[in-house]
Image (cartoon, rainbow, N blue to C red):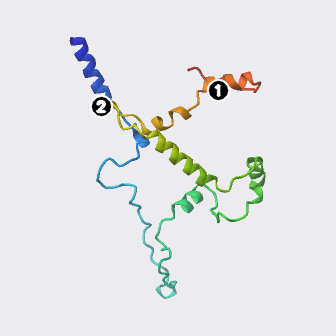
Amino acid sequence: MRIIACALIAVTFLAACENNGLRQVTSRGDGPDEFIVVPSKPLEEPTSFTALPAPTPGGINRTDQLPLQESVEKLGGQRGSPTAPIPARDAALVNRASRFGVDPGIRASLAEQDAEFRRRQSRLTQIRLFPEDLYNRAYRREALDPGRTAQIYRRAGVPTPTAPPR
């Protein structure tokens, strides 16, 4: 009896050590959302107050954050228009990637398929004795077994690197 009680206490303590990290991104309460707050750039004093540009209602402010543009610039790139022509240095990469055709509505199609997949997976998933990672639960059947996949490719004659031990 003491062994069972000790085992239950040990399991309880181990369950308390669970850490979902960033995998659990749904809000668990009515508290503040720390991802909404974006700090603004510091105010700058212009060299001449008479040479200020005219205000643009609804436009961007010099202190507004532009996270996509700033992250691309910090990484050494240049963010252009999404409808701009493909730069010459990237033409070979784009041609190779699109050699089997390009679906212009791929993002919308994948978003719709993923929403349908998650809807089907959520029918009876609320009944659980122990909490489980939502991402792993939804995509469990989509995960690849590296050893099995390597064997399938080897049987087909595809040269494959050695897989790490399980």
With 93 as the anchor, is 69 left or right in this view? Answer: left
* Quarter placement of the C terminus: top right
Residue found at the far bottom of this picture:
50
Query: What is the distance, in whole Å, between disc 2 and disc 1 at their CAs?
Result: 36 Å
Identity, as a three-letter code, of the amino acid under mark 1: Thr
Identity, as a three-letter code, of the amino acid under mark 2: Ala
Task: Using the rendered view, name the quadrant where residue 77 is placed.
Answer: bottom right
Q: Secondary structure at mark 1?
A: helix
Residue that badge 1 annotates: 149
- Closer to the chain start, of discs 2 and 1, is 2
Q: Position of residue 57 (x, y in %)?
A: 47, 81
With 104 as the anchor, is 122 left or right in this view? Answer: left
- 85 lies above or below 116: below
Q: Position of residue 82 (x, y in %)?
A: 65, 63
Q: Position of residue 17 (x, y in %)?
A: 33, 31
Q: Secondary structure at mark 2?
A: helix
Disc 1 crowd rating (10 Å Cα; few below 14, some 14-19, many 20+) is few
Residue that badge 2 annotates: 16
- 77 lies above or below 1: below
Q: Which mark is residue 106?
A: none
Residue drawn at 51 percent across, 64 percent down: 66
- 64 lies above or below 2: below
